[in-house]
């Protein structure tokens, strides 16, 4: 447990945690001792010796005082430790997340990580504050009781001790059972949630095709499947819990039946025996308490396990101290795959500085991957990607990013105002700089639509803006950043003709003193490019100027002809 | 007021499994009684051996206790199997209800923020209720039954024992009561703070690519860490005053305290001669039974509050207003669509569409063009009834949409929208959604027409490939599947919103031809940014600021020299090689 916490919170926490555990152990020790003091007390009372019971009572009171002091301090100390842990985890996770490779993030991980970095941390905090007590006390208090019983009557102690290995085994076994069922129940619950979410998202289509019933049936099958998985796993979990409870109960049964029989044989003092029974029942209580928190403790352990995995995720290594010396980009026989078949194979492309390059090709050709490799979302499997003459793997992430501005296909806007979202590109920008980016991105008309202009909140995920508007905000952001190399992934797909025409002018202007690499199927942008790279099957099939490639009469020429002959529906 | 509302939310949700829960509680009731037996047995054994000298009885009692323990085990097993089964059933029922609710809410609901919360509600709130259904009720039964049994036994032994036995519980309770006064307010505060760190973590993680590329990773991480630290500071502010009080209350409730008071009072009363030795024993054994339930309930209280909040949210979700369909539905008499005096609003304040008059004659193509934000999308969403207009009405074959049963409406209208979603099902199921009985030939025919057939065959499992599980298609490919899907449906009216936006040029031409063949015999309402795709339309409506400002055919509009001419000019200019 301590090792687990230390693995996520850091070595400096070890002494503090050990101290907490030692305090809790002392608390359990005094608790056990208090119960033990009941034995001489009850023995005296049951022997009708009121005077003889006074001393044990005073002893009990003294032990209680010690218990109270220790408990008071451990309780406060548990809180303090919990909060210190949470602080450390915020620091460590906060610092770690920014070093994770961008390629690491996908929908599932993003969701999981954001939960981990908020609720997960709070969970660990409460582990230290609340959950460690019952666990530690469940070990030390019964241990003290057992040792005492052994001193008084070793046979009874043996009778009790026999169940210990079984109950420990049952505890661990039930923990494991529950752990595996937790994981799969967590999995099936998440799956059910995702399915309903997808069902909700697909509603427009489902209703349009009047197929809600069919899809509902598919969904329902998934729900039923998750239901039976839950039931099956719960059966497992119940089994483990029962076995554990059974061993504890067996201990009490053995104590009572065996004890009574020994009492009958006159081998033990009867008042003492009865007092030991009371002790035996008390012996069981903290143990059953441990079963109650086991559930919560396990979930917190799983949380810390996930945190540990994230902490251990290696950042992308920076193997050198290179700095880009110009604005060119170069792919040298790059191989790359996402783990399911090659995406780029022997991909080579030379992009001289201050040029506008259009990347064109059928879907699945690897166009977006090319841009992601320049921004080093992933590392190549073979060959290399150079930026300004430097291998991207040898350039510090910060330096690399300083040279790049990217407009992603899926626009992400922060929950803030339009202005704030643009200013991310250059936090210290002047008003003039901001406005020229706004104008270049054709955002003026949009801003005029809102009375608050740049101060209009974009809503969660940009909900207040249309697709085209979000795209223009992200273009303004990239323009404001004023980076050497601008990567545009379908940056104008959601724009109408008029906006697109204006935007093209902005992009062309941009490429006068910058390198612009644009994925697009807008013929106008393609034609304006200095160079066109036609991608097919993970390599550059053809490259050159528009006229040059047309004259070549190859794949690109086919592509252009198709574009030109395409008409409307009718 | 609020209290009754929230508790009814929980009870309303768990109604379907109420029977099982009551049964489980009854079983748990007996289990709790069986659980008290060993404690009483210790006392009775003492009585038999010491007071009565009846050793035969002591042996019987010991065996009775052993039997009670075995019985308890069986009963607990039964109760927990019942509750967990009930919980699993409950979750299934709840998820089904939510899915059902999803099929009724206005389609516009899905494009608002509420859909984003859906997943969280689904996962966290259903889980919060799991604790209530699976654990809380039976725990309460135990917590109530155990002290009552102990109390009854003490009264039977000697009523004088009662005050001494319940003293620590009474003091502890009084103490808790003074602390818990503003628990609800505190909980709300806590939840608010919690959602702040959730939001900050989400913004940090989701925006990571933007953060990194734009070089704000240090600030973003600082912001996240600061929010985290602020949360802890706030948290400390709440607990620091309460902490000592609650530590004290818990101390009063601790078994050690009970044992000490029992021993102290027991000895005093014994010395006074008010109670006998066995009764001192009884006091020592049973006093902790009175404090334990409160510790359990205190532990549970947090979960109960969470469960109530969760239930409220879920009931809110289930009660999302649905799109009204009038009692008496009519069949449309033709496929003529008419928008008459239509005004529409999203926020209830600002109209995004004003006074729209538009007729879609059967088998004609109507194109909507205009700058973004002009209302094209809104207008197109009214026909498949994503939401209803604020004023005016949309009629199909002379019947207002609200008087047409949804299945009839959607057997007349299909659409291909830009924000396409595929289901996590096989490609075949996705294509055949419109016609589950479609043959493989039909499916392949439309897939070929949509130029996606070859791509599908290149996948290892072809048409049986499960989407979303390791196989992901590009935006263009996704769109082509939705086009194939629409083609397979056989509706007389089709709404197309930027249907070709993601189609790459290579496929675009062939795809357009296939689309043209398909739409040729249908009524089409289309939105296009690429004006070259609308030149042949029967009617082009140019929209601006929620109104139709120009309408007519291509040639006429170009010569008119208005907004359309300007848009066309930009278009032509960029196509000059």
Image: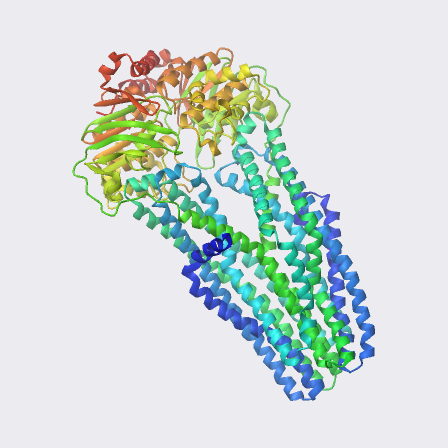
Residue A137 vs A202, above or below: the answer is: below
Q: Is residue A185 left or right of residue A559?
A: right
Residue B128: percent from left, percent from top = 51, 53
Q: Position of residue B359 (x, y in %)?
A: 22, 28
Q: Quick check: A454 left or right of B49? A: left
Q: Residue furthest front?
A: B1
Q: Residue A453 versus residue A433: which sits nearer the camera?
A: A453
Q: Quadrant of the C terminus of chain B?
A: top left
Residue A433 visible, this orientation:
yes
User: Residue B267: where, in percent of width, then height?
Assistant: 77, 76
Q: Is residue B356 above or below residue B263?
A: above
Q: Nearer the viewer, residue A345 or B178?
A: B178
Residue B34 placed where, x, y %? Answer: 57, 74
Apparent side of residue B425 relative to residue B176 in the rendered image (left or right): left
Is residue A149 something one can see in this rendering?
Answer: no
Residue at the extreme left of the image, as rendered: B333
Where residue A319 sits, quadrant-wise, is top right
- Between B417 and B352, the residue placed more toward the observer is B352
Which residue corresponds to the image point at 36% horizontal and 11% vertical from the top-left? A547
């Amino acid at each position: 447990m301590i090792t687990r916490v230390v693995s996520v919170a850091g070595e400096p926490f070890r002494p503090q945690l050990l101290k907490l555990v030692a305090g809790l152990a002392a608390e359990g020790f005094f608790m056990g001792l208090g119960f033990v003091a009941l034995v001489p007390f009850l023995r005296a009372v049951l022997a009708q010796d009121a005077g003889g019971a006074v001393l044990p009572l005073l002893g009990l009171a003294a032990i209680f005082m010690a218990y109270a002091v220790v408990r008071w301090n451990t309780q406060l100390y548990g809180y303090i430790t919990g909060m210190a842990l949470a602080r450390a985890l915020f620091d460590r996770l906060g610092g770690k997340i920014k070093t994770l490779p961008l390629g690491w993030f996908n929908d599932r991980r993003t969701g999981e990580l954001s939960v981990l970095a908020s609720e997960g941390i709070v969970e660990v905090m409460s582990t230290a504050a609340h959950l460690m007590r019952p666990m530690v006390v469940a070990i030390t208090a019964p241990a003290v009781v057992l040792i005492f019983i052994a001193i008084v009557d070793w046979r009874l102690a043996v009778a009790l001790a026999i169940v210990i290995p079984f109950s420990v085994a049952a505890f661990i076994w039930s923990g494991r059972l529950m752990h595996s069922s937790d994981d799969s129940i967590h999995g099936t619950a998440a799956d059910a949630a995702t399915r309903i979410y997808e069902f909700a998202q697909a509603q427009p289509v489902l209703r349009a095709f009047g197929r809600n019933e069919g899809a509902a049936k598919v969904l329902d099958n998934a729900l039923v499947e998750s239901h039976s998985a839950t039931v099956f796993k719960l059966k497992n979990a119940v089994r483990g819990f029962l076995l554990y409870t059974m061993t504890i109960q067996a201990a009490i049964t053995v104590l009572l039946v065996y004890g009574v029989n020994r009492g009958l044989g006159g081998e033990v003092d009867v008042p003492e025996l009865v007092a030991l029974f009371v002790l035996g029942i008390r012996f069981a209580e903290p143990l059953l308490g441990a079963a109650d928190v086991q559930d919560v403790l396990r979930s917190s352990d799983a949380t810390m396990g996930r945190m540990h995995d994230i902490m251990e995720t290696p950042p992308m290594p920076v193997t050198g101290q290179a700095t880009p010396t110009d604005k060119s980009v170069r792919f040298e026989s790059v191989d790359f795959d996402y783990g399911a078949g090659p995406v780029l194979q022997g991909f080579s492309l030379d992009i001289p500085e201050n040029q506008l390059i259009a990347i064109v090709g059928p879907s699945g050709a690897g166009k977006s991957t090319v841009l992601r490799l320049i921004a080093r979302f992933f590392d190549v499997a073979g060959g290399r990607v150079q930026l300004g003459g430097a291998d991207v793997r040898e350039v510090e992430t910060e330096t690399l990013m300083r040279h790049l501005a990217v407009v992603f296909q899926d626009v992400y806007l922060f929950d803030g105002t339009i202005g704030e979202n643009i200013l991310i590109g250059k936090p210290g920008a002047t008003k003039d700089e901001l406005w020229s980016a706004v104008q270049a991105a054709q955002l003026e008309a949009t801003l005029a639509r809102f009375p608050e202009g740049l101060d209009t909140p974009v809503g969660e995920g940009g909900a207040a803006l249309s697709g085209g508007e979000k795209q223009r905000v992200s273009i303004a952001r990239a323009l404001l950043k004023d980076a050497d190399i601008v990567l545009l992934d379908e940056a104008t797909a959601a724009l109408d003709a008029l906006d697109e025409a204006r935007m093209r002018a902005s992009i062309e202007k941009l490429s006068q003193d910058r390198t612009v690499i644009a994925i697009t199927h807008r013929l106008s942008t393609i034609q304006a490019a200095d160079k066109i790279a036609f991608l097919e099957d993970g390599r550059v099939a053809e490259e050159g100027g528009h006229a040059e490639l047309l004259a070549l009469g190859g794949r690109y020429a086919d592509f252009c002809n198709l574009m030109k002959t395409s008409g409307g529906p009718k | 007021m609020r209290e009754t509302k929230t508790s009814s939310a929980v009870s309303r949700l768990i109604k379907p499994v109420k029977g099982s829960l009551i049964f489980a509680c009854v079983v748990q009731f007996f289990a709790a009684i069986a659980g008290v037996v060993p404690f009483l047995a210790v006392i009775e054994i003492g009585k038999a051996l010491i007071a009565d000298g009846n050793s035969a009885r002591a042996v019987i009692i010991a065996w009775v206790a052993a039997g009670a323990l075995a019985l308890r085990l069986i009963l607990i097993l039964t109760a927990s199997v019942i509750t967990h089964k009930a919980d699993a059933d409950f979750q299934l029922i709840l998820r089904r209800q939510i899915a059902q609710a999803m099929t009724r809410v206005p389609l516009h609901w899905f494009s608002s923020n509420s859909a984003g919360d859906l997943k969280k509600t689904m996962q966290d709130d259903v889980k919060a209720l799991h604790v209530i259904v699976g654990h809380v009720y039976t725990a309460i039964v135990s917590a109530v039954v155990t002290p009552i049994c102990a109390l009854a036994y003490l009264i039977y032994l000697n009523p004088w024992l009662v005050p001494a036995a319940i003293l620590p519980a009474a003091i502890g309770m009084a103490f808790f009561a003074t602390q818990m006064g503003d628990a609800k307010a505190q909980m709300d505060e806590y939840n608010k703070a919690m959602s702040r760190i959730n939001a900050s973590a989400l913004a940090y993680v989701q925006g990571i690519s933007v953060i990194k590329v734009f070089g704000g990773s240090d600030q973003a991480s600082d912001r996240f860490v600061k929010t985290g630290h602020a949360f802890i500071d706030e948290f400390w502010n709440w607990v620091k005053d309460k902490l000592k009080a609650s530590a004290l209350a818990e101390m009063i409730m601790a078994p050690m305290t009970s044992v000490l008071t029992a021993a102290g009072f027991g000895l005093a009363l014994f010395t006074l001669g008010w109670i006998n030795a066995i009764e001192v024993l009884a006091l020592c054994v049973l006093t902790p039974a009175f404090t334990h339930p409160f510790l359990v309930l205190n532990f549970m209280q947090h979960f109960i509050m969470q469960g109530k909040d969760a239930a409220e949210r879920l009931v809110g979700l289930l009660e999302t207003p649905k799109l009204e369909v009038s009692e008496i539905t009519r069949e449309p008499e033709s496929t003529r669509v008419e928008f008459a005096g239509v005004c529409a609003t999203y926020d209830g304040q600002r109209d995004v569409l004003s006074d729209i008059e538009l007729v879609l004659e059967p088998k004609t193509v109507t194109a909507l063009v205009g700058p973004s934000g002009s209302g094209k999308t809104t207008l197109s969403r009214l026909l498949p009834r994503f939401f209803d207009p604020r004023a005016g009405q949309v009629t199909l074959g002379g019947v207002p949409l609200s008087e047409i049963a949804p299945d009839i409406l959607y057997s007349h209208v299909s659409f291909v929208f830009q924000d396409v979603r595929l289901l996590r099902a096989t490609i075949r199921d996705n294509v055949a959604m419109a016609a589950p009985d479609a043959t493989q030939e039909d499916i392949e025919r439309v897939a070929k027409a949509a130029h996606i057939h070859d791509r599908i065959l290149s996948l290892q499992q072809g048409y049986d490939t499960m989407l979303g599980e390791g196989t992901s298609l590009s935006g263009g490919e996704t769109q082509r599947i939705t086009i194939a899907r629409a083609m397979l449906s056989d509706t007389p009216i089709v709404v197309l919103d930027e249907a070709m936006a993601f189609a790459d040029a290579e496929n675009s031409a062939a795809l357009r031809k296939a689309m043209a063949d398909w739409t040729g015999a249908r009524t089409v309402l289309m939105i296009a940014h690429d004006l070259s795709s609308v030149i042949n339309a029967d009617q082009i409506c140019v929209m601006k600021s929620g109104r139709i400002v120009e309408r007519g055919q291509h040639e006429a509009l170009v010569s008119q020299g208005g907004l359309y001419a300007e848009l066309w000019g930009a278009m032509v200019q960029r196509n000059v090689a």
